[in-house]
Amino acid sequence: WSWHEYGMRVGAWRFFELFARLGIQPTLATNARVCEDYPRVAEQAKRDGWEFMGHAYDQMPIHKVEDQAAMINKSMDILERFTGKRPVGWLGPGLTQTLDTPELLVEAGVKYIGDWVYDDEPTTIRTAKGPLVTLPYTVELNDIPMMIVQHHESDYLLKRATDQFDRLHAEGKDRAKIMAIAIHPYISGQPHRIKYLEAIYDHVGKHDGVLHWNGEQILDWYNSVANRTKMKAAE
């Protein structure tokens, strides 16, 4: 508990400082109870204009939740009351879902998910309740598997992230690519790791043609492109 507590007491503020300095408003995938138990952190994210993304109420695997629909709606309702806006994105704890989850998310107002890590570009999946967009998320540039499971040294985040960025940036000259970095304040917010996260953005900042968008902005862009494509096909 105290390790995670460090992230909320100390590590998160290193994130706030970094992204405020860079003028970036990232997506915050947050358990809804953070708004209740750590309002100071949630309030800062709200003030800084971060996008709030549904991430369940507790950090519990979806398949272990007795009433999944109730949990999803409770989470979305809490975030909506706190921010004044209903979230459009969802990330399952540990990327967990059941066969019913996509339909339940659409019913709760979710427009995009990050659980399906199968592409560098958005896709649209069909559900019985309507379409749901999948946005690129990552288990490869995620500090939990990288640092806690694979036990890499702190600077490895920088190496892997810059290698990924360089390839996607090169490919992006012909077709837009999306790179996600998944960080947690109790891991990448540590004093011995934060400079490598800062160095990633230093590297990215040296390149032209790069946008720092949150999930909702990517969703809006993707939908606008999809609509233009449909209109052109109908001509």
Image (tube, rainbow, N blue to C red):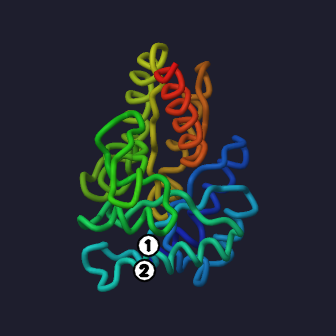
Query: Residue 40: image x %, image y %?
Result: 68, 75
Q: Is tag 1's residue or tag 2's residue first in the polypeptide sequence?
A: 1
Q: Is residue 79 above or below residue 92?
A: below
**Residue that badge 1 annotates:** 56
Please state which amino acid type lies under the numbered disc 1.
Answer: Ala
Please state which of residues 219 and 168 is positioned toward the viewer in this rendering.
219
Residue 61 picture quarter: bottom left
Q: Residues within 10 Å of mark 2 (few under 14, many from 20)?
A: some
CB under 8 Å between discs 1 and 2: yes
User: Which image quadrant: the N terminus?
Assistant: bottom left
Query: Residue 117: image x %, image y %?
Result: 32, 46
On the rendered structure, is 39 left or right of 146?
right
**Residue that badge 2 annotates:** 71
On the rendered structure, is 209 left or right of 157?
right
Query: Residue 17: image x %, image y %?
Result: 69, 53
Task: Give me the disc on residue 18.
Answer: none
Residue 213 picture quarter: top right
Q: Residue at x 49, y 54 (%)?
A: 111
Query: Residue 76: image x %, image y %?
Result: 54, 72
Q: Residue at x 58, y 34 (%)?
A: 224
Q: Residue at x 32, y 49 (%)?
A: 116
Please state which of residues 151 and 27 is positioned toward the viewer in this rendering.
27
Please state which amino acid type lies under the numbered disc 2.
Answer: Met
Identity of the residue furthest to the front in this view:
235
